[in-house]
Amino acid sequence: MKKIYVDVDDTLILWGIHLTVNLPLVQKLHEGILQNEYDVTVWSGTGTNWAKKWSENLFPDYNLPFGSKEDLYRKVHKDTFAIDDRKQKERNYLKRFKQVFLPEEFIKSPLI
């Protein structure tokens, strides 16, 4: 099972005039969870309750872990993947992950 960290603010919810859900990403993650391929942890930079609530609504049958970016510095294993809206060089904490996917990259190509 591959452990994947997902930034809910940047990838599951797309900012605009209205909040919208990135359904292709959510569907791929949900399928992977159901098939026991992925263990998903959702984090939020703000650590706010709305991010946790959105995550639980998107994955209603999954006991979704939730943490702050500070947690990542202590918990990330070297083989853990991330999904984020920035490339690795743009955010220091992402350098701890084995590979960082943009949402569309994760949807188009499976983890190897």
Image (cartoon, helix red, strand yellow):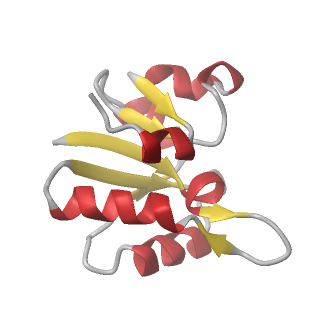
x then y, percent, for residue 38: 24, 49
Q: Residue at x 72, y 75 (%)?
A: 19
- Relative placement, left or right, of 52 versus 61 is right
Q: Residue at x 57, y 42 (%)?
A: 84
- Relative placement, left or right, of 82 versus 9 is left
Q: Nearer the viewer, residue 74 or 96?
A: 96
Marker count (numbered): 0
- Relative vertical location of residue 85 with respect to residue 54 in this rendering, above or below: above
x then y, percent, for residue 102: 56, 39
Quadrant assignment for the C terminus:
top left
x then y, percent, for residue 18: 78, 78
Q: Residue at x 31, y 65 (%)?
A: 30
Q: Nearer the viewer, residue 109 or 93?
A: 109
Is residue 65 shown to the viewer in this render? no
x then y, percent, for residue 79: 28, 25
Q: Residue at x 44, y 56 (%)?
A: 42
- Relative placement, left or right, of 20 versus 51 is right
